[in-house]
Image (cartoon, grey):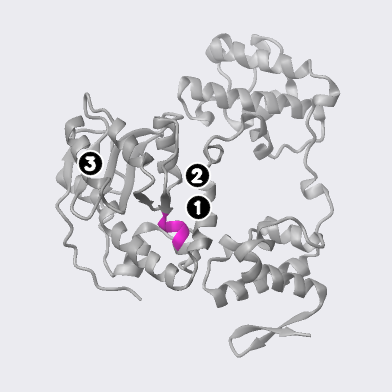
Amino acid sequence: MARALKADFPAPVLMTSTDELIAVVERLRREPFVTIDTEFVRERTYWPELCLVQLAGAHDVVVVDALAPGLDLAPLGELLDDPAVTKVFHAARQDLEIFLHLFDRLPAALFDTQVAAMVAGYGDQVGYDNLVSSLTGAHIDKAHRFSDWAARPLSPAQIAYAAADVTYLRTVYQLLRERLEKEGRMEWVAAELAVLTRPETFRPDPETLWEKMRPRTSNRRMLGVLRAITAWRELEAQRVNVPRQRLLKDESLLEIAATGPADVDALARVRGVSRGFAEGRSGAGLLEAIAAAHALPDASLPRQSKGKDGPRPSPALVALLKVLLAACCEEHDVAPRLVASSEDIDRLAMDAEPDLPLLRGWRRVVFGEDALALKAGTMLLGVDGTRIRRVPT
């Protein structure tokens, strides 16, 4: 139930100098937790361009202008490194990617209220505005949601909007933490946050990105070329700092993998590849990647995953397991997506007891044990009025 909340936070302060940042970081490092958010642009770049960093403590609300001339963000890195201060984000992945790129390390002692809200039963990937409304009764003005945060000067309304992302977050964090501690679910949250503490979460292996292209072929040579050129595109997009799709679209990569152009003229004939690209440094690098893939021995070539061509689970059993998942999550007031994905359910339907997260830890308690019992025939599902009921046999 929402609690009425009076918006009596400190007025936000726009911060543009290193000395100001040093002073506020010294104060914030004496607090048990600090709420953090960022504003950035990345439509034209591979790496997000950090524009603002919002920070809120008990007595400070600051909007740091990351584009201010001469501003050194090193003091912010010291705050993020401090294990004694919990850093609270909402939907932290993009913020963490920015900080990892900026400081080459992830914040210590972090907490994500979106993850916590899923554990607390507020649905899958609940938005910040909706969570604030649900927990506090307050409503956030969305007028500046699509601002160009790289444009200067910033208006007072923009600064106030940016600050709201960290002021109400303090109350959201406190209410969620209170509830989760009361229900004994803080360990559940910690288990989910573990993935956000690993740099590899934000730095995908270029050699495996080809698998996301879902090529419709079993030709291992073509797959080898696709693996090589997809990895090349990722590294080249990072080097020239442009979005990977702007550098070269997926459709062009698939055509290149199928045709294997060996020279500039052949490369320039591929749809989506300009003559200038083919003749330039990027084109030369791409041709080298293609040639290297063609020179690989057969044993080094990848294989297409079985995917839809492999054996499929019983649709009826999958449907039944999904009904059970929804019923268990309804009972425990936790988001189903957090417990098991569709791929997890498929594997569970296929294998006797696969190595899946849903069969370990708190997920096994919530759903895994019942799922195994349903498969073994020692549990039935029935309807009791308007709810699904589990019936031991």
Cα distance in 3D space between marks 3 and 1 = 27 Å
Residue 148 in view, yes or no: no
Residue 193: mark? 1
Closer to the camera in the image, 281 or 21: 21
Observer-side mark, 3 or 2, equals: 3
In the picture provided, is 39 more to the left or to the right than 300? left
Cα distance in 3D space between marks 3 and 2 = 24 Å
- Check the image and report above or below for 7 versus 391: above
Percent across and percent down for residue 230 are 63, 28
Helix, strand or loop at mark 3: helix
In the picture provided, is 353 more to the left or to the right than 13? right
Percent across and percent down for residue 360 are 66, 61
Percent across and percent down for residue 313 are 80, 60
Determine the residue positioned at 40% across, 42% down. Answer: 95
Q: Earlier in the sequence, mark 3 or mark 2?
A: 3
Determine the residue positioned at 15% across, 54% down. Answer: 10
Cα distance in 3D space between marks 1 and 2 = 7 Å
* Dots 3, 2 in contact, CB < 8 A: no
Q: Residues within 10 Å of mark 1 (few under 14, many from 20)?
A: some
Percent across and percent down for residue 2 are 32, 73
Q: Which residues are magenta?
A: 112-116
Determine the residue positioned at 53% across, 29% down. Answer: 244
Helix, strand or loop at mark 2: helix
- Check the image and report above or below for 387 versus 372: below
Determine the residue positioned at 69% across, 37% down. Answer: 211
Question: Going by the picture, which residue comes out furthest to the bottom?
Answer: 385
Residue 26: mark? 3
Pointer 2: what residue?
A: 197
Residue 84 in view, yes or no: yes
